[in-house]
Amino acid sequence: MSNKLRIGVVGCGGILEWAHFPAYMKMDNVELVAFCDILTERAEKFSKKYFEAGKTDKKPAVFENFSDLIKMEGIDAVDICTPNYLHSIVAVEALENGLHVFCEKPDAVSVSEAERMKAASEASGKVLMIMRNQRYDNSTRYLKDRIAEGKMGEIYAARCGWQRRRGGPPHGSWFSKKEESGGGPLIDLGVHMIDRTMWLMGNPKPVSVSGCTYNVFGDNGSGSGLLPEGTKSTFSVEDLAMAFVRFENGACLQVEVSWASNVKTDDIFFELRGTKEGAVQNQNTKGRLTVVSADGDFNPDLSAYSEAQGHEGNIRHFADVVLNGAEPMFVPQQGINMVKILEAIYKSAETGKEIFL
């Protein structure tokens, strides 16, 4: 491998546009060598933009079929930005062809597919990493260090959520079709908040899940407006999910996510309860992190954690793992545990019973 990680991107939609591509434009240890999309004009747009920005001496190749990208010469890794149902399909083929894989969340749409991805990574010896951008938020990194120093004690309970009052996907989007997305806001938004909170809790092993899901607004555009007359709804996922997760160490986690719900305002929040200190952060306080203790509450100075955050921080970490052997902050078993939780929430909602993992 050269001193640059040569990456081919599969899927050239919105998440590449506003998250992955801006990160790559700032990185000097990565070179994008190919773009793939079933709409080749979208792949061509990014190839042209990357080349004209002077990020490469050779215009990146453009493909319609991801298998052709995977088989091209001079490629080290793929970045998967496709609809959810394709994540495991592309990842396994890439790993089996000796490529490293970075993939957008969710890991997969079923536990069996997540397990196939892990097995393919182990068999090939290549890195498999799934986007966990919330771990790279400055407040998350601050709390991770504070917990590691023992200042918060044992984290024994937590709650998290991402609620939107009216914020569903456009009608007809793959996000609203269960066969392509695997689920609604639980898979779209919940993955972020569940992973962030579990990571701060030390990634405890989940043992049981109770959940409820609802589709109240989906048939009228997930609350964003009535469908045109005569239009058939394609909305086959939930627009609200609530869940309760128990862990092997006795800790618990409460989850709430929605695309549409009759709440007063949108909010993104998480709360940790430790034996020495607690912590809370929510959108309604402009994202300000508060540490809570018997000695009084305070808002910590996060300036020491100002390095690349979010998606960029995660992508930079992936490159560091592959190029420099850095210890990965994500391992595939964490992804399997995540999908187990998601799958169990849906099963619990369907059966009305607690699901034991």
Image: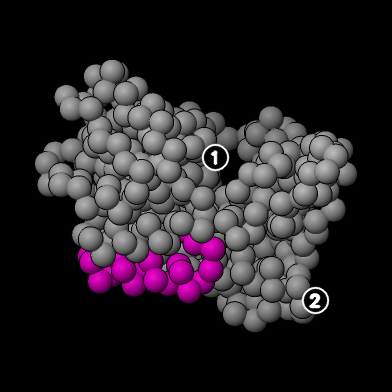
Left or right: where does residue 226 sit relative to residue 159?
right
Q: Left or right: 139 with respect to 316?
A: right
User: Is any part of residue 260 visible from this angle?
Assistant: no
Image mark for residue 228: none
Q: Are marks 1 and 2 in contact (CB under 8 Å)?
A: no
Query: Where residue 324 appears, x then y in whole percent?
Result: 20, 47
Name which residue type carries label 1: Ser
Instruction: Name the mark on residue 352.
Output: 2
The magenta region covers: 106-125
Q: Which amino acid does label 2 sit on?
A: Gly
The image quadrant of residue 55 is top left
The structure's colour scheme is one colour
How would you rate the neighbour count of disc 1 (Cα within 10 Å): few for under 14, some for 14-19, many for 20 or more? many
Q: Give the secondary structure at mark 2.
A: loop
**Mark whose residue sits in front, 1 or 2:** 2
Residue visible at 49% across and 37% down in the picture: 13
Residue 37 magenta-drawn? no
For label 1, the SS is helix
| Residue reaching furthest to the front | 230
User: Can you name the residue that lies furthest to the left here?
Assistant: 2
Q: Does the magenta stretch include residue 123?
A: yes
Q: Position of residue 146 (x, y in %)?
A: 50, 48
For residue 156, side relative to residue 122 (left or right)? right
Q: How many marks?
A: 2
Q: Which residue is drawn at 72% across and 32% down?
A: 285
Q: Quadrant of the C terminus?
A: bottom right
Residue 242 in sight in this render: yes
Which quadrant holds residue 128? bottom left
Check the image and report above or below for 283 versus 201: above
Q: In this view, does 309 lie above or below 353?
A: above
Residue occupied by mark 1: 139
